Amino acid sequence: ASAVEKRRWTLNDFDIGKPLGRGKFGHVYLAREKRSNHIVALKVLFKSQLQQSQVEHQLRREVEIQSHLRHSNILRLYGYFYDQKRIYLVLEYAPRGELYKELQKCKYFSERRAATYVASLARALIYCHGKHVIHRDIKPENLLIGAQGELKIADFGWSVHTFNRRRTMCGTLDYLPPEMVESVEHDASVDIWSLGVLCYEFLYGVPPFEAKEHSDTYRRIVQVDLKFPPRPIISSTAKDLISQMLVKDCSQRLPLHKVLEHPWIVQNAEISG
Ligand SMILES: Nc1ncnc(NCCc2cnc(NC(=O)Nc3cccc(C(F)(F)F)c3)s2)c1Br
């Protein structure tokens, strides 16, 4: 099918299909752009809800940032349009759906599958950081699976250009590095921390600093209270990589290109085409 051409879309340009999922701000539907017959995902957001949450500027930033990103492990945002009450995001469709559902189903991933995902995310983040974009919200809920089983980072609603540092708190605390939890200056290395949290959760099925109370999670993060459970049995090289990413001092975290050279990744990640 021809690329989804950029033009002033209206809802009439699409045939709407089944619901794909629901996010905090709205539902996502499978859709087909009539002219190109291109299958897309259409996220429907209510203006009223965006206004009362005062996040319009974040949405504008997401559309702006995404219009410059082209990477096989980043879900495309082709464009947007709006009507009286709603804003519609025209997104690349990820045929194998949401990673967090896959993780719930499998409980945890094999070391090969986890390393393959971590390697593709590291490559996508190297690409983003090269364009001075930090995602800041890397977590299973924002990861989708493409037709060949490859990971796609989605939802740049919390991303920023690195020259302006933001201290906005977002969503679950689990993935936030100490400097964001303590609301101090932060830079691209926040994504390295979140990748370390993700790697741990891929292998154990739970994030490393999970606790019943918010305040306990907060304390475990700022103290980097990192413990590896006895089950499932995980290689020492995997634990070594995680320990080099979950470091309080953001300048001491393993740089993303070193993540790709780490023995655990080299020995376990399937090289994608
Ligand atoms: N199988 C699938 N294939 C493709 N997509 C699927 N789901 C949608 C994934 C998304 C990609 N990008 C997104 N972006 C936002 O939601 N942005 C957003 C929304 C509200 C407020 C804000 C803000 F204002 F707070 F920034 C920003 S959701 C699924 Br399931």
Image (cartoon, rainbow, N blue to C red):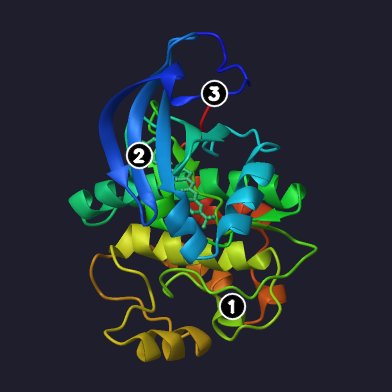
Q: Earlier in the sequence, mark 2 or mark 1?
A: 2
- x and y, in percent, of residue 249 in the image: 66, 81
Q: Is residue 139 left or right of residue 27?
A: right
**Looking at the image, can residue 18 be seen?**
yes
- x and y, in percent, of residue 18 in the image: 25, 29
- For the residue marked with disc 3, what is the amino acid? Trp
List the residue tagged with mark 1.
Answer: 180
Q: Distance from label 2 to label 3 (Cα)?
A: 17 Å
Q: Distance from label 2 to label 1 (Cα)?
A: 29 Å
Q: Earlier in the sequence, mark 3 or mark 1?
A: 3
Question: Which is closer to the viewer, label 2 or label 3?
Answer: 3
Q: Is residue 41 left or right of residue 70?
A: left
- x and y, in percent, of residue 155 in the image: 50, 49
Disc 2 under 8 Å from ligand 1? The reply is yes
Q: Is residue 5 left or right of residue 108?
A: right
Image point (61%, 34%), residue name: 71
List the residue tagged with mark 2.
Answer: 28
List the residue tagged with mark 3.
Answer: 9
| Tag 3 secondary structure | loop
Q: Earlier in the sequence, mark 2 or mark 3?
A: 3
| Tag 2 secondary structure | strand
Compared with 120, 197 (above or below) is below
The crowding category of the residue bearing disc 3, from other C-alpha atoms within 10 Å (few below 14, some 14 to 19, many at least 20), is some
The crowding category of the residue bearing disc 2, from other C-alpha atoms within 10 Å (few below 14, some 14 to 19, many at least 20), is many
